[in-house]
Amino acid sequence: MTERMTIHGVRDGDERPPPPRLALDGHTWREIAYLLANLPMSLIGFTYVVTVLATGAGLTVTVIGFPLLAVGLVGARQLGKLERARARALLGLRVEEPTPLPLLRRGGPSRRLWLALKDPVGWRTILYDFIRLPWGILTFTVTLVSLFLLWPVLPFLARGLANVDRAMVRGLLSPSDELERRIAELESDRGVVVDTAAADLRRIERDLHDGAQARLVNLAMGLGLAKEKLLEDPDTAAAMVEEAHGEVKLALQELRDLARGIHPAVLTDRGLDAALSAVATRCTVPVKVTVDLERRPAAAIEGIAYFTVSELLQNISKHSGAKSASVDIWRAEERLLIQVRDDGRGGARLDGGTGMAGLAERLGAVDGLFVVDSPVGGPTTVTAELPWRDRAEEVAGR
């Protein structure tokens, strides 16, 4: 009789069983290993958490309680890092590492202590390890019993229990996307603020050195020569004093202009409406200024709004070719809105080299917005937003 092959690869009439093979694949065995390791890991985590909370919280009445609690939270971050690595190796779960605490870059000891105590990553890891003990006992027991008694359904049980673990790791040990994004933005904005402040200081130093300081040096030399000429040639000395008097006037004018560039007195005394009206008079095109504010914002916000409009009006004078322009400022809920329009040639861009990019960076550094709508041929509309802060709140915070 001719032998025939079956679909199992065994010849008809051959009584031998098929070759042995593993009933579970490598992925399932890694999940089983993860579930069996839950018990020792949860015991370690729970013991650490109870020790940290009991010791740190119990000693908060003394001077060492809060530092111990802060150290415990920093250590909890390391436990979270270990759990993320375990989930990555055995469950194939990719979880991003949270941003490290900037303890070496932030102020004195009290500042670093407060930064560690309010660390959300550390507290979420504490919560994770605290609730893991009963779950670790359950997963270890179920997996171990199923390994010997319920092995036909073990792959399904392992997958379901491992999925719960995946959800717990994602929910408690993964960084908050919004928080991480905001931290990155603030780090970037801080750099912009520092660079802008340094550039402003260099500009002020340059203006003082090349302008008022040079005039004052010439003034001192002129008065010295006039003093020598006073007795032997009074007429020449009088002329030199007259010339020195003119130099004094010019130096005072330069110092006033410089002070106006730092923070104009009219802005401090009378607010945005009067200060921007004064700026508008220096623009080469007619400008209509409308400020609709019931009360003045905080001085810092007011100053940023002033310099933003001032630079935009300078751009209109130099580059727009406009015949008229307008400035509108009003408050909408908790935002200060600025809109500057002109009927010029348009084509303004943030990368156009007219200082727009610098304005956008400065406003972004204080959680503001800067939008340019300038089609070729015009008109141009620039809209800026700043967070509103009351002047009374600023004074109270000092």
Image (spheres, rainbow, N blue to C red):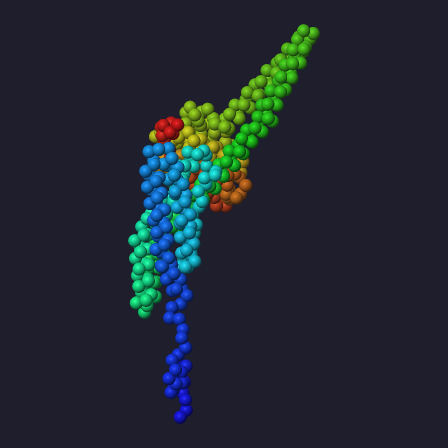
Which residue is most to the right? 232
**Residue 171 visible in the current orientation:** no
Residue 15: % across, % down: 37, 84
The C terminus: image quadrant: top left
Residue that appears at 37% across and 57% down: 37
Residue that appears at 65% across and 12% down: 226
Q: Pick the residue in front: 54 or 227.
A: 54
Please tell me how many numbered marks the rendered image carries.
Answer: 0
The N terminus: image quadrant: bottom left
Residue 252: % across, % down: 55, 20
Residue that appears at 47% across and 30% down: 280
- Left or right of residue 252, residue 225 in this image: right
8 over 80 or under it: above or below = below
- Left or right of residue 3, residue 220 in this image: right
**Residue 165 visible in the current orientation:** yes
Q: Pick the residue in front: 321 or 384.
A: 384
Residue 381: % across, % down: 45, 41
- Left or right of residue 159, residue 280 in this image: right
Quarter location, residue 220: top right
Which residue is most to the bottom? 1
Quarter location, residue 365: top left
Residue 206: % across, % down: 58, 29
Residue that appears at 52% across and 36% down: 195
381 over 150 or under it: above or below = above
295 over 322 or under it: above or below = above
Which residue is most to the top? 231
